[in-house]
């Protein structure tokens, strides 16, 4: 056990040095020392509680995705069955409830044809089937979402939402936001250094779903005010801050355009009215649709709807063929600019609600780091003094192991880009206090074996061997507790667990393996006649 | 150089002589802890309770004007705010509960948070808003659930590991000791109404780990001695094992303590609860390893035969090798 061939020594030192070196960029980043550029420079992330910044936990409602999906389904089913190139199939009594779409096929003889033509929609384009189709009571078709189809839809909506959030937050000009999915329906957004989260929340809280729908001129104003819409129409309120706030508009439910297909949006001023407006440009597909809508409905009033609230209801004076349009709606320069950012990044595929929020000032974090490092320093000196006073030479070896251990923990964290949080600093202090336990166990055991009359080499060997059992058991049980800690809790607490777990792994390496190499070297070279332990 | 000796060589303290009184006291303490938890309740932090928490530092004052603050903020009409000093004299945490179940909780929370900070800024100069945290009731409920799950799972998992590595009696003993440590820590939080946050759950999980370290070291020695001294009385053997590992127990607890105390004294205020809980757990855990985890073995009937039938092939070879080595040494000496 005390045999350390040269290759083994080189390997052990190599591992220790490489990992410990990875800690250097993080330690020197504030001191102005230049780290050579050709080297990789792994750096430890500072958690929000240390760096300051904002944290948001957002949650989507899967039901909302289901509703939108159902709406899209209804449109495609209608379009398919109305398709003039094939035979038109009449349907009636269309109803959507309990997440299902159902309708009557007017002619029983059309049932098979309808089923056949809807099959591609039911199967979807992906690997899994999207909808199940069944026929009840003879002529009623019921389309039910499949579990897989629904899950896929939520999944895509969440991935899409993350993309949109990234664009929007980047547009705010902040540095390195973290945007990650958590569980099925949640997203964590962290923006270090951001002091005032208001603007961030504004961008995140807005779905920015822009719609153009035709105003239903047949609706009676008195009915609309009471919230009664004619069949095939729905009622939206005017948006807050618009001139008609408090009023409602009835619009035709189908046949409008969604503003998903924008390629650009910018804030501007209407030269004639001096009003703040948002200019939008459609992509070619959206432009064609918009041109068609405006051509077919010249003279009619339409509603510009943002997130289920009406901004304005202009009239199509002439066909709009250029693929661009101007939105007005009682904007200020600021709100026009924000809307432009939201529209440009695209609509969020699903509405996100803020369910947890935290913002931390930068002073507190800097102060915490300073105090934490001071405590770590004093604690380390005290531990080292105690170890050397008690175990002499063996305490010095333990000290060497301890210092390498701290550097290695930092190095591992930098390499894997882990985040150091405030409780993580406490994790470091604990690692320092606990890592020497292995040395204490080994040293005490060596002392015992000497007292029992073993010769020096045999005592050292037995000491390491007998102590190792308890060291490994203790580390494994701590590891179990640590893993449960990682799976539990939010960012800061996880940062604590990460330090503890990394510390466990590196401390076995330094406190057991490295010190054994040093002790072996000393025994071989100095051939001591007595152990002072 | 003369080395420091904290524990003299060859101690022979009869720890377990008092095992029954200590057991009774421990059980009473566990009951008292749970009684406190149930009657006084736990002072849940914003993590577990939900609500809006604002932390501020009065940079120009030696001490935060808490009563005055309470009066001023109470007048805002969001119920009585919970105001606690946070480590430093001039640092406070202010907690306001949110209206229950409001769908537009985000706006409500913002409005309340802004009103609180606005009111403070209006009344005092040089106030630094350190952090602002909103936790919805839903998330808080989930945190509570996962905290209970994590603590339960941790205790069971490590007890299971000990069972596999040792014997079922050892697993049961370790579990009992851990239950004691966790109960007393909770009891302390109930007694002093210290804020119970996510960090404290992390602290308890850490306590579980460290308390177990001590238990494992003692158990490991007990197992070794059970194999070595087949004829020795169990109580005597446990005392021997505890005495043999005493120097290590004291030394390790001490290194942890000297590392923790500076953090307690100079560390950041928001870590105080975490560090205090771990420090408390350090004492409780060391005690339970010696006075609870070990005597449980007596009551559950561990004896020298416990490890004989289960002796694996590897153990057997190890034992033979050891006996062989002993004989050779005897021959040489």
Image (spheres, rainbow, N blue to C red):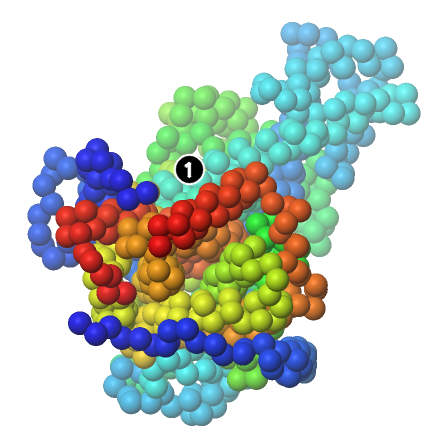
- In the picture, which quadrant includes the C terminus of chain A? bottom left
Give whichever of B217, B9 is nearer the camera. Answer: B9
Residue at 56% x, 68% y: name it.
B238
Residue at 48% x, 90% y: name it.
B71
Q: Residue at label 1?
A: A163
**x%, y% of residue B184?**
58, 76
- Residue A404 located left or right of residue B305: left
**x%, y% of residue A344?**
38, 38
Query: Looking at the image, can residue B265 be seen?
Result: yes
- Residue A375 located left or right of residue B209: left
Give whichever of B49, A374 is nearer the camera. Answer: A374
Residue at 40% x, 67% y: name it.
B248
Residue at 46% x, 26% y: name it.
A286
Q: In the picture, residue A80 is in which quadrant?
A: top right
- Residue A20 located left or right of residue A445: left
- Above/below status of B56 relative to A146: below
**x%, y% of residue B98?**
56, 71
- Residue A209 located left or right of residue B306: left
Tell me which chain the residue with mark 1 is part of.
A
Label 1 SS: helix
- In the picture, which quadrant includes the N terminus of chain A? top left
């Amino acid at each position: 056990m005390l045999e350390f061939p040269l290759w083994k020594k080189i390997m052990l030192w190599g591992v220790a040095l490489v990992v410990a070196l990875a800690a250097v960029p993080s330690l020197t980043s504030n001191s102005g020392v230049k780290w050579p550029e050709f080297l990789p420079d792994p750096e430890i992330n500072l958690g929000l509680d240390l760096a300051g910044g904002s944290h948001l936990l957002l949650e989507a409602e899967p039901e909302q995705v289901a509703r939108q999906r159902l709406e899209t389904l209804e449109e495609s089913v209608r379009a398919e069955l109305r398709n003039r190139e094939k035979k038109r199939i009449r349907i009636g009594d269309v109803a959507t409830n309990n997440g299902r779409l159902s309708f009557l096929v007017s002619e029983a003889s059309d049932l098979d044809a309808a089923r056949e033509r809807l099959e591609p929609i039911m199967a979807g384009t992906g690997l899994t089937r999207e909808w199940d189709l069944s026929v009840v009571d003879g002529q009623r078709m019921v389309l039910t979402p499949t579990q897989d189809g629904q899950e896929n839809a939520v999944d895509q909506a969440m991935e899409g939402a993350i993309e949109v959030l990234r664009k929007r937050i980047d547009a705010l000009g902040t540095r390195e936001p973290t945007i990650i999915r958590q569980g099925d329906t949640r997203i964590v957004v962290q923006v270090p250094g951001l002091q005032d989260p208001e603007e961030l929340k504004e961008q995140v809280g807005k779905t920015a779903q822009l719609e153009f729908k035709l105003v239903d001129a047949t609706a009676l104003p008195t009915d609309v005010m009471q919230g009664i819409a004619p069949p095939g129409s729905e009622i939206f309120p005017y948006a807050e801050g618009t001139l008609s706030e408090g009023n409602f508009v009835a619009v035709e439910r189908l046949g409008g355009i969604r503003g998903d297909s924008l390629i650009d949006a910018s804030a501007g001023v209407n030269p004639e009215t001096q009003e703040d407006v948002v200019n939008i440009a459609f992509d070619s597909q959206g432009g064609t649709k918009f041109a068609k809508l405006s051509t077919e409905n010249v003279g009619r009033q339409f509603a510009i709807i943002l997130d289920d609230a009406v901004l304005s209801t202009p009239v199509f004076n002439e066909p709009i063929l250029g693929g661009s349009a101007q939105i007005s709606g009682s904007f200020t320069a600021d709100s026009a600019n924000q809307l432009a950012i939201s529209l440009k990044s695209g609509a969020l595929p699903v509405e996100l609600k803020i369910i947890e929020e935290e913002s931390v000032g930068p002073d507190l974090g800097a102060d915490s780091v300073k105090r934490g490092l001071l405590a770590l320093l004093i604690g380390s000196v005290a531990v080292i003094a105690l170890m050397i006073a008690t175990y002499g030479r063996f305490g010095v070896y333990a000290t060497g192991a301890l210092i390498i251990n701290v550097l290695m923990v930092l190095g591992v964290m930098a390499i894997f880009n882990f985040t150091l949080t405030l409780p993580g600093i406490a994790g470091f202090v604990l690692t320092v206090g606990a890592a020497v336990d292995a040395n204490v166990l080994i040293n005490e055991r060596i002392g015992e074996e000497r007292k029992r009359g073993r010769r020096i080499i045999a005592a050292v060997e037995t000491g390491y061997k007998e102590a190792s059992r308890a060291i490994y058991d203790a580390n494994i049980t701590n590891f179990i507790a640590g893993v449960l800690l990682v799976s539990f809790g939010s960012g800061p607490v996880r940062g604590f667990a990460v330090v503890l777990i990394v510390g466990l792994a590196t401390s076995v390496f330094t406190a057991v393996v490295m010190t054994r190499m040093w002790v072996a070297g000393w025994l071989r070279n100095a051939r001591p006649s007595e152990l002072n332990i | 150089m003369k080395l420091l000796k904290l524990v003299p060589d060859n101690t022979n303290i009869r720890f377990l002589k008092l095992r029954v009184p200590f057991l009774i006291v421990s059980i009473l303490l566990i009951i008292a802890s749970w009684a406190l938890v149930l009657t006084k309740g736990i002072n849940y932090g914003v993590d577990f309770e939900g609500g809006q928490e604002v932390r501020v530092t009065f940079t120009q004052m030696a001490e935060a004007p808490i009563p005055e603050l309470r009066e001023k903020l109470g007048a805002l009409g969001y119920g009585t705010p919970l105001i606690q000093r946070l480590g430093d004299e001039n640092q406070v945490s202010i907690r306001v509960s949110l209206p229950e179940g409001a769908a537009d909780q985000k706006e409500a929370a913002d409005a309340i948070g802004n009103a609180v900070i606005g009111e403070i800024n209006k009344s005092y100069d040089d106030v630094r808003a350190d952090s602002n945290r909103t936790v919805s009731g839903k998330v808080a409920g989930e945190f509570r659930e996962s905290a209970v799950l994590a603590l339960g799972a941790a205790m069971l998992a490590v007890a299971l590991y000990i069972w596999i590595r040792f014997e079922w009696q050892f697993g049961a003993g370790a579990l009992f000791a851990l239950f004691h440590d966790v109960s007393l820590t909770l009891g302390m939080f109930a007694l002093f109404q210290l804020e119970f946050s996510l960090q404290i759950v992390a602290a308890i999980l850490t306590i579980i780990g460290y308390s177990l370290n001590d238990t494992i070291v003692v158990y490991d020695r007990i197992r070794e001695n059970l194999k070595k001294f087949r004829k020795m009385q169990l109580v005597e053997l446990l005392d021997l094992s505890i005495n043999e590992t005493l120097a290590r127990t004291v030394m390790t607890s001490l290194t942890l303590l000297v590392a923790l105390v500076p953090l307690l004294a100079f560390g950041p205020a928001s870590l105080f609860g975490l560090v205090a809980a771990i420090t408390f757990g350090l004492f409780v855990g060391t005690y339970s390893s010696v006075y609870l985890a070990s005597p449980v073995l007596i009551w559950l009937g561990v004896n020298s035969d416990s490890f004989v039938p289960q002796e694996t092939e590897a153990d057997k070879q190890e034992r033979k090798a050891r006996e062989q080595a002993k004989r050779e040494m005897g021959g040489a000496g």
